[in-house]
Image (cartoon, rainbow, N blue to C red):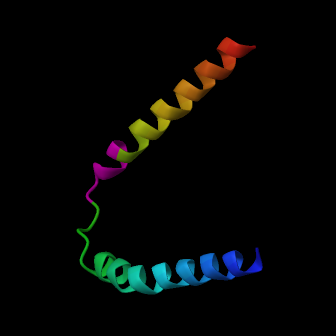
């Protein structure tokens, strides 16, 4: 089973090597944040947190 661990480690390293240049390019060429962008990010997060709290309260 050691060869499988080595194989998976090599695959993960290869994936990082392939994806790193693309991620770096995406970071440099991404649009800058606007003032209303935080609301668009916070509202779905709060919705998910609220849903999880609802599920927890239903189990208790």
Residue occupying image coordinates x 68% and y 16%: 57
Q: Is residue 25 above or below residue 50?
A: below
- Residue span colored magenta: 34-40
Residue occupying image coordinates x 50% and y 33%: 48
Q: Using the image as rendered, state which of residue 37 and residue 35 is in the foreground.
A: 37
Q: Using the image as rendered, state which of residue 14 and residue 26 is in the foreground.
A: 14
Q: Is residue 29 above or below residue 35?
A: below
Left or right for 29, reference 22: left
Indicate yes or no whether the magenta region holds residue 12.
no
**Residue 50 sits in quarter:** top right
* Coordinates of residue 19 in the picture (x, y in percent): 40, 79
Left or right for 6, reference 38: right
- Count all numbered tags in the image, as a single digit: 0
* Coordinates of residue 23 in the picture (x, y in percent): 37, 77
* Coordinates of residue 41 in the picture (x, y in percent): 38, 46
**Residue 22 sits in quarter:** bottom left
Residue occupying image coordinates x 61% and y 75%: 8
Q: Is residue 32 above or below residue 9?
A: above
**Residue 3 sits in quarter:** bottom right
- The N terminus - image quarter: bottom right
* Coordinates of residue 4 in the picture (x, y in percent): 68, 75
Left or right for 54, reference 42: right
- The C terminus - image quarter: top right
Q: Using the image as rendered, state which of residue 39 and residue 15 is in the foreground.
A: 15
Q: Is residue 37 above or below residue 16?
A: above
Residue occupying image coordinates x 30% and y 51%: 37
């Amino acid at each position: 089973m050691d060869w499988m661990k080595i194989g998976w480690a090599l695959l993960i390293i290869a994936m990082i090597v392939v994806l790193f240049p693309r991620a770096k390019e995406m970071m440099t060429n991404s649009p800058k944040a606007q003032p209303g962008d935080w609301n668009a990010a916070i509202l779905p997060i709060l919705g998910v947190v609220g849903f999880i709290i609802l599920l927890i309260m239903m189990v208790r």
